[in-house]
Image: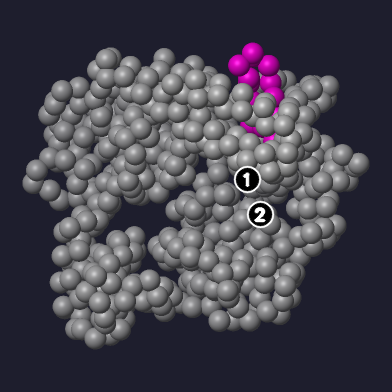
Amino acid sequence: MAIDDASLERVRRAADIVTVVGEYVQLKRRGQNYVGLCPFHEEKTPSFNVHATRQFYHCFGCGVGGDVFSFVMELEKMDFLEAVRHLARKFNVEITETADRTGDRRGERDDAYRTLERATTLYQRLLTSAAGVKGREFLARRRVSAEMQAAFGLGYAPPEWDFLAKRLPKDGVRPELLLATGLCARGKSGGLYDRLRDRLVFPVRDPRGRVIGFGGRDLSDAPDTPKYVNSPESPTYHKGSVLYGLDLARKALRDSPALLVEGYLDVVSLHGAGFPAAVAPLGTALTEEQAKLLGRFSAEKGVVVLFDGDSAGQTAALRSLLLLVNAGLAVRVAVPPGGKDPDDVIREEGPAALSAVLDGALGLEEFLVRTLLDRHDPAEALGRGKLIEELAGHLFVLTGGVARDVLIDRFADKLGVNNKSLRRDLRNAVREGQPTTRAVSGDRGVVSRRVRPAPLEQGVRLLLFLLFNDRERATRVVAEIRPENFPESVRPAVEPAYEAVREGRLADVGPAAEKLEPAAREAFYRVMETELDEEERERAVVDCLGAFRRRNLETELIRLKAELKEAYRKGDEERYRKLLAQIDGLKVEEE
């Protein structure tokens, strides 16, 4: 069964979070908000905050937070649908539930799927036409066969700003559908423009094989253009809950462990080389939801994490490894040699070489021990301190006590100390960083999920506050700053905020926070706790936008000065004079 969006919104507006939480927690008013003892961990001093205006809760003690639905789900151990029904009954809200629509039954979701399939067909045709030569040349260089191109439905988006915006309405597609599916966005003039331009297109499918969104790889080599972009969040597409290639890998996962790789091309390359169990997150770090999704298909055979062999890839591999262990999966990590990515290994050495890499995959304990000992020298006091601090952070992520105990035993052995001594050192590191209290204490009681907030620049914090709390000033932010300009750690929350502002509303805090990793989520909630008056808000938007403009001017000046130097070297006087005039103009603007 499914509940329509209008019903969800009615329940959300009716189910006041202060009223709901107040039935479980004794709340006291503090300013505009309410505080009480957290129902999710034991505490003596109230650190659980409920925000009446923005309808979310957050505990400074253990780091939990969310909206009214997540509160009921967590406390009553309900799934999402059960929580919605429970609140609907409680607040006398009528909801509409429908069976999943199939076949010829029409509805908005069906229209969206058909529109996305139509766009996929157009992109595929362009790739094989004269217009798609750039895409075909790129795929030829990456040795992607025609068979794999067809299997994954690869296509090409032309450079035109309005290819789909003009073409699909001729097939009867309404402009609202182009916006709802994320194929197009609305420009300042009110017209529609294509989101994907001059890009190799990767259709993203759900496990049932339906196209739900797209990824695009830039082929323009234009400066300041992101190499990869994804469809925005939509009724069909939720980036943090989908795995690329899972629809094609499902059959292979019955007999083989899943191969979790980093990106689109890695998946395509591995399938083409005879590794059909490869899947990937969609341009972001693996999420808890994706780990659980993979668990539905790989519970028996487990997962091999196969990220790039460089430092960044191995850091991402470690983070994914811990999430997969929490999802109850047997997990190993394979490390490509020489900092290569899996596609490099296949193209340079062949599938047999990659098989050898997979055969040498390491288990959780061995990989974590090796990684931390490679980063930090325990023979030095500073190195030992950093190792223990990082280990404490990783132990916090693990929810299973057995896995934590095994790791502590292994590290105690490697460091030449007894288990009790290492636990004491870890507890000291925890007290300094405050990530958790259970991970190293041996306590089997209540979990304390305290997370050290991710560091965010002051300007980013102010912009986040405005995006979720001040519609007029958020509109000014959206007009000048792109989501890509925000740190990657908070971008999953920024994207729905931008969509909401463009629709003339503010995004809900709870659902946006759920898209973030724990450290970023804690930082995000702290930002939402901020209180700014009108004068402070205006100063914030003026200062932040001013700083952004200055940074853009500085970047442009650096680029123009490099071109000026090149024009001088070539003796191109006309080009030199034009560039000099542009630089002078920017300097005046900068002043």
Residue 305 percent coordinates (x, y) = 54, 67
Residue at the spot of label 1 = 228
Question: What is the secondary structure assignment of the residue under circle 1?
Answer: strand
Query: Start and end of the magenta stretch?
Result: 182-196
Residue 25 percent coordinates (x, y) = 17, 36
Image quadrant occupied by the N terminus: top right
In the rendered structure, find residue 264 and report the number of the disc placed on it. Answer: 2
392 left or right of 266 in image: left
Residue 479 percent coordinates (x, y) = 52, 21
Camera sees residue 281:
yes
Instruction: Reply yes or no: does residue 390 show up in magenta.
Output: no
Disc 2 to disc 1, how far (Cα)? 10 Å
- Residue in front for this viewpoint, 437 or 26: 437
What residue sits 36% from the left and 45% below the top? Answer: 520
What residue sits 46% from the left and 32% below the top? Answer: 551
Q: Label 2 sits on what residue type?
A: Tyr
Question: What is the secondary structure assignment of the residue under circle 2?
Answer: helix
Q: On the image, which quarter does residue 257 sit in?
A: bottom right
